[in-house]
Image (cartoon, rainbow, N blue to C red):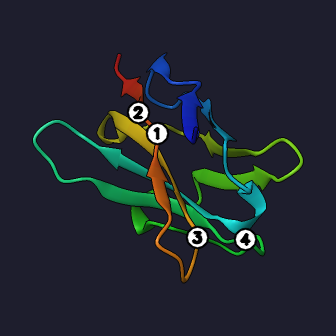
Amino acid sequence: QVQLVESGGGLVQPGGSLRLSCAASGISFRFYDMTWYRQAPGKQRELVAAITTRGITSSADSVKGRFTISRDNAKNTMYLQMNSLKLEDTAVYYCNARWPGRNAEYWGLGTQVTASS
């Protein structure tokens, strides 16, 4: 059974930091490109940051210089270090795993991040 479990969300003041984790089970993690998405109330889901099987990273312009994505294949876990959080970062953050070239894609249930004073 495939599971992607996000954790680390919470309430933080603007300017603060959080570290999200996505723990994967039931998949060969190292073969999957991993991505963080987020969805704010009333808005479409958007890509936040991605990391390929080879460790190549990319991120949305809105989070560049503030968020860092990483992965630990030995622990089957992906991370998102979020610094200098802003009010507009408030959203549910989702973990996505996709095997390039195969019909294999999975989603986590999400973790809430709220930046508020």
Distance between mark 4 and mark 2 Cα atoms: 22 Å
Residue that label 1 marks: 108
Q: Position of residue 103 (x, y in %)?
A: 46, 72
Distance between mark 1 and mark 4 Cα atoms: 18 Å
Give above or below for 90 relative to 51: above
Direction front: furthest residue: 1
Q: Residue at x 47, y 52 (%)?
A: 106
Give above or below for 7 relative to 49: above
**Which amino acid lies under the numbered mark 4 shown in the image of this protein?**
Thr
**N-term mark: 3 or 4:** 4
**Which amino acid lies under the numbered mark 2 shown in the image of this protein?**
Leu
Q: Nearer the viewer, residue 42 or 31?
A: 31
Check disc 4 and report its element: helix, strand or loop.
loop
- Residue 99 is tagged as 3
Q: Position of residue 19 (x, y in %)?
A: 64, 33
Residue that label 4 marks: 53
Check disc 1 and report its element: helix, strand or loop.
loop
Q: Nearer the viewer, residue 116 or 77?
A: 77
Q: Nearer the viewer, mark 3 or mark 4?
A: 3
Q: Is residue 48 visible?
A: yes
**N-term mark: 1 or 3:** 3
Distance between mark 3 and mark 2 Cα atoms: 19 Å
- Contact between marks 2 and 1 (CB within 8 A): the answer is yes
Q: Quadrant of the N terminus?
A: top right
Sort mark 1 into few (<14), some (14-19) or many (20+) by Cα contacts within 10 Å: some
Q: Residue at x 67, y 43 (%)?
A: 26
